[in-house]
Image (cartoon, grey):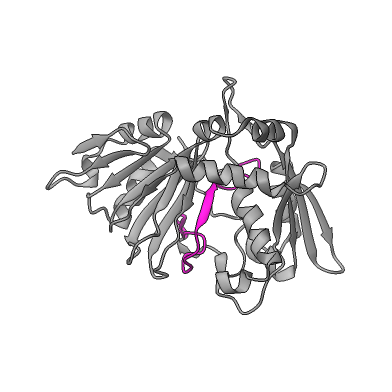
Amino acid sequence: MTTSTDMPLRITAAEGQALGDVDPADVRKALDESGAIALTGFGATLADFVTLGNAICDNWHDYRGGGFRFGSLDRRTVDTEASILTATGSTQTFPIPLHGEMYYFKERPGVLWFYCEIPPSGGGGETTVADGKALLDGLPPDVLTYLRANDLMYLRRLEAADWRQAYMTDDVNVIARICEANDTVLTYDAETDVVETTFVTPAIIRDPDGSERLISSLLPVWFGEQIAEAGTAAEILGETSNRTPPLVVRTATGDRIPAEIVHAIYGTGIVQETKVDWQPGDILAVNNLTTLHGRAESTDPDRLIYVRMGNLR
């Protein structure tokens, strides 16, 4: 097998090699040092994908409470025991900008695992990755100043059917326990059966060693609100009516994030991101604590990428 050291680190199978020939310790090391690793050409099965993931991670996440677990964006559960899910908006072709997974929660999965069952045809649909520290370092000084001065506040308003879908429960007490564990303020109106939550977090993540990186859910949440307000959400999502976005992002004082700030982050990410092509049986693992991911626009709604979310052992 051959190994490249670019972002993501890539291990490519030589003829006759199987995924079992890859040392899980090497994958773990790549996640720590490179932030992402792509395993290509091994012709891995879904069972191989699960075995490798289980050797490195545990505490698999079922995406309960996920910000995009609503409507046609929802992830479909493929295997409950192994916590295998489809990707967000798996039947849609729109791009998803760089983000950290579930950064509207305090507790976030440490590693994201992607497996290609059916690659997108006709071009596009690549998974994108970028280093959070490099993204932060690449921002203009005025954007850095703004992000240091303003925490992000994620606000959710979920009506009856939506909160049951998002949190996978009929019991508001389950949501209360999730919110308590995530430093999230919960409000429930029994008369209207509406759940509202508020979570505040720094825009810039500081590691225990003092190093900083930019990882958040800002971009997809902000752009999601923009398309909803423009009245184009139904067309983009393939739904019959436009939705009021159930998740929005503001500053901690309730102000909207200026468009010029968001577009500066987005533009810097476009320059820095790497696109990962897909072939059947390919695997991509992403360190969600250091590395952002996204999706390029696709022309094929029938691609099939599976996802698992866990924490390093």
Whether residue 198 is visible to the viewer of this picture, yes or no, is yes
Examine the residues drawn in magenta and state their main secondary structure: loop
**Residue drawn at point x = 57 percent, y = 19 percent:** 209
Q: Magenta segment: does it hold 289? A: no
Image quadrant occupied by the N terminus: top left
Location of residue 109 by image quarter: top right
Residue sitting farthest toward the bottom: 240
**Residue 58 shows in this picture:** no
Q: Quadrant of residue 285?
A: top left
Taking depth in this image into account, of 65 and 287 the one nearest to the observer is: 287
Residue 90 included in the magenta stretch of the image: yes
Residue 107 position within the rendered picture, expressed as x and y whole percent measured from the top left: 62, 41
Q: Where residue 220 appears, x then y in whole percent?
A: 59, 53
Which sits in the foreground, 7 or 107?
A: 7
19 displayed left or right of 52: left
Answer above or below: position of 134 versus 252.
above
Image x and y of residue 225, in percent: 68, 59
10 or 77: nearer the eye? 10
Quadrant where the C terminus lies? top left
Q: Is residue 59 left or right of residue 263?
A: left
Residue at point 26%, 40% (across, down): 11
Q: Is residue 129 above or below residue 220?
A: above
Give the total number of marks visible in the rendering.
0
The extreme top residue here reads 209
Task: Tell me which segment is drawn in magenta.
Answer: 80-107
Left or right of residue 45, residue 250 in this image: right
| Residue visible at 68% across and 49% down in the picture | 259
